[in-house]
Image (spheres, rainbow, N blue to C red):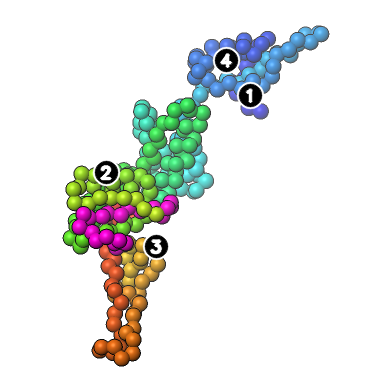
Amino acid sequence: MDEQNVFTAKSVDEAIEEGLKTLKIARDEADIVILEEGRKKLFGGVRAKVQVKKRQSDAKRAVDFIDGLLEILKISAVSEIADDSSSIKIDIKATNSARVIGKHGDVLEAIQCLAGAVANTGRDEYKKVIVDCENYREQREETLKKLAVKIAGKAVEKGRKLNLEPMSPYERRIIHSALADNTEVKTVSEGKEPNRYIAVIPNNAKPFDKGLHYGERRGDGRRDGRGRERRGDRGDRRERRPSGGNGGGARRGKKEIYFGTFLGNSGNKGEE
């Protein structure tokens, strides 16, 4: 047992008061653990024993958790509290920020989710926790806003619904907000987590348009909205005409369009 900040007295209340007085804190600022209830015996008695510690702030508890998590992951980094007012903002400084951020911020998002749960343990009202690394979130937000405007323009130009890659709720909100005042398109979220994505639909889209995928490009081909490889820009499927049809041979199936520009990679902050 850790004997630090352990206080004894005839009763539990007296032991607690002694601890609060020694640490110079109020009762609502303390974490109190009763180790032994005081009780009388025929000859003498057993003194009450309590442990009194100054309660960590929600932000400090989250920071300690993040530092411990980074150590387990063997990531050389340290976190610090940037703000602890209406919301908790924590900044992570790392020698290799790409490992903290992950692909499109997925690692950073997971750290933030866990830190939020730790910070709000025992709280009656939820307090928002934001975890950032090397100003990634601000850069990512600017990239997504520019992407939203670009996609809206392409959707109107082609008269087709455009489906973006799956995004986190945080990133989807940025896209929705960026196009909220656009009178030429509307945005809707489709699919199920973790593959939920945004569809940008122009006013001039045709009914029952399933949309084109604004997806990831690989070196020698493209991927569809579910990440499957397609062979070449023209696709690999062919539809054959019935024998005796005009022209004979095969005719090319309907071409699907995939756009090459992607959202970037957290390892290269310039693209984010």
- For this view, does 204 lie left or right of residue 230? left
| Residue to which mark 1 is pinned | 3
Q: 35 and 110: which one is in front?
A: 110
| Residue lying at 42% horizontally and 41% vertically, measured from the top left | 112
* Nearest to viewer (mark 2 / mark 1): 2
User: Which one is in front, 218 or 83?
Assistant: 218
Q: Which residues are magenta?
A: 192-212
* Labelled disc at residue 177: 2
- Cα separation, mark 3 vs mark 4, equals 60 Å
- Compare marks 3 and 4 and give the one earlier in the sequence: 4
- The residue labelled by disc 4 is 19
x, y (%) of residue 268? 31, 55
- Nearer mark to the viewer, of 3 and 4: 3
Q: Position of residue 245 (x, y in %)?
A: 29, 88
At numbered mark 1, what does the secondary structure look like: helix, strand or loop?
A: loop
Estimate how packed mark 1 is, as few (under 14), some (14 to 19) or many (20 or more) residues with alpha carbons within 10 Å: few
Residue drawn at point x = 38 percent, y = 29 percent: 84
Q: Which marked residue is nearer to the observer: mark 4 or mark 1?
A: 4
Callout 2 amino acid: Ser
Q: Residue furthest bottom?
A: 244
Real-space CA distance between mark 2 and mark 3, rounded to the nearest whole angstrom: 25 Å
Q: CA distance from mark 3 to mark 1?
A: 57 Å
Left or right of residue 197: residue 118: right
Quadrant in which the N terminus is drawn? top right
- Is 197 magenta? The answer is yes
> Dividing the picture into quarters, in which one does residue 215 lie?
bottom left
